[in-house]
Amino acid sequence: MIAKSKIGVLTLTVAMALTSLTGCRKKKYENPIGKDTQQPDKVLFDKAVADIERGRYEVARLTLNTLINTYDTSEFLAKAKLAIADSWMRESGSHGLAQAEAEYKDFILFYPTMEESAEAQEKVCTIHLRQMEKPDRDPKHLYRAEEECRQLLVQFPNSKFAPRVQQLLRNIQEVEAEGEMRTARFYVQKGSNPAAANRLQGIADQFPLYSAADEALYLLGNSYDKMGVRFKPQSVRSYQRLVKDYPLSTFVDPAKKRLKELEAEVPEADPVAVARMKYEAENRTKTGMMHDFWGIFKKSPDMTMAAKSGTPQMTTARPTIPVSVPVPAGAPGGVSEVGGTVLTGPSALDTKPDARLSKENEAAGAAAAPAAPVVDAAKEQQLPSNRQAVPAGKAKKVKTPKPPKNSGK
């Protein structure tokens, strides 16, 4: 029994030692300064980096703020400001990530030409990417992540972070397209063909790299088929685009069959599209057996089916008008703006008799109307007052009441 207790104590001691070693292991900082010098500002920066690596973020920020406020001409000023943002991002949490985004934005504003500005913009995109939820949840961070990734590709197109952010943008748009696709499938099952066609058309036009874009085109053609003969051209275009741009899809054979039934041309497959689909099939992210099971319990979306090649969409998706909505004649795109002009000459109010009487009608009306009676101002009766007026010379004398007689006489 004593030997067993000693073994148990020894095992517990070893486990605690391993836990303490792994817990105190430092996580290297990404942007250290390699310059070997004993300048006081550099000493402060190194001390703050050591605190960040050990998880003492508040102490590190105090040290960095001391550096910034004391050595305002230091060559490490930009690095110190970036390190403050990195400390907030490592601290994580909703408050920490919000503070990190604000600090990164300030860094980009003050140092837009530094190479680290592209890194700061990439981290802003990553902040919202980490907070993204599944396609059927709140898309706030999804839209913000897409916007910030586009901003990096526009502002820093030659940065070393551009290829990675381009892939992040493809992942984000995969999730966005999946959310639209779920809505479209709901409309298809419900039988709301115009609504389904509108959603599916938006997916096909806005997200051609979406993993289920071929399915979207096939369902789009079916929706137009069910809407009647009037929408035959749209149906034919959907099937033709599927056959041409997604030649390795499982929906190609049904689409070809439907094109023959509609007596439409069956296009040839695009060689570039064939090569792209082969590349995607070979480089698709491999998932384990329990991937779908654990995905139920995860808050973040599944982005393993996102494309690995192609240029992501650089414009924001905008709502479209369904083709079943009639467009007024003379306005092929509809009217979305209202304008006004200043009238300088005669307008319709002056020329149309139904809007305003012409001068002739006005003269005729004036001649036919009876003349108004002339009223003598002197004889005009005055407005009644609260007292009745008394004629002059007939004013009544007001009798003064006599005082009462003395009762003692």
Image (cartoon, rainbow, N blue to C red):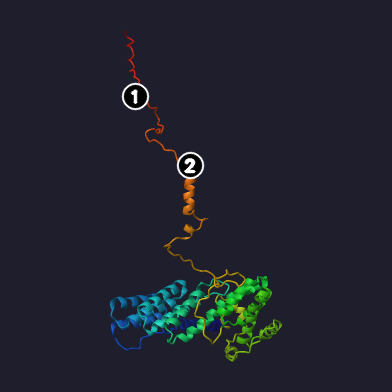
Q: Position of residue 141 (x, y in %)?
A: 50, 74
Q: Nearer the viewer, residue 258 or 85?
A: 258
Name which residue lies at 51% across and 56% down: 353
Residue pushed farthest top? 409
Residue 215 appears left or right of 100: right
Q: Which amino acid type is shown beneath numbered disc 1?
A: Ala
Q: Secondary structure at mark 2?
A: loop
Q: Nearer the viewer, mark 1 or mark 2?
A: 2
Look at the numbered discs 1 and 2 and tell me whether their residues touch, using CB distance below 8 Å: no
Q: Nearer the viewer, residue 356 or 237?
A: 356
Residue pushed farthest right? 261
Q: Name the residue that disc number 1 marks.
A: 392
Q: Name the residue that disc number 2 marks.
A: 370
> Quick one: label 2, few (<14), some, or many (20+) residues within 10 Å?
few
Q: Nearer the viewer, residue 296 or 14?
A: 296
Comes first in the chain, label 1 or label 2: 2
Q: Position of residue 130 (x, y in %)?
A: 50, 77
Q: Nearer the viewer, residue 108 or 364?
A: 364
Q: Position of residue 94 (x, y in %)?
A: 47, 72
Name which residue lies at 62% across and 89% down: 269
Q: Which amino acid type is shown beneath numbered disc 2?
A: Pro
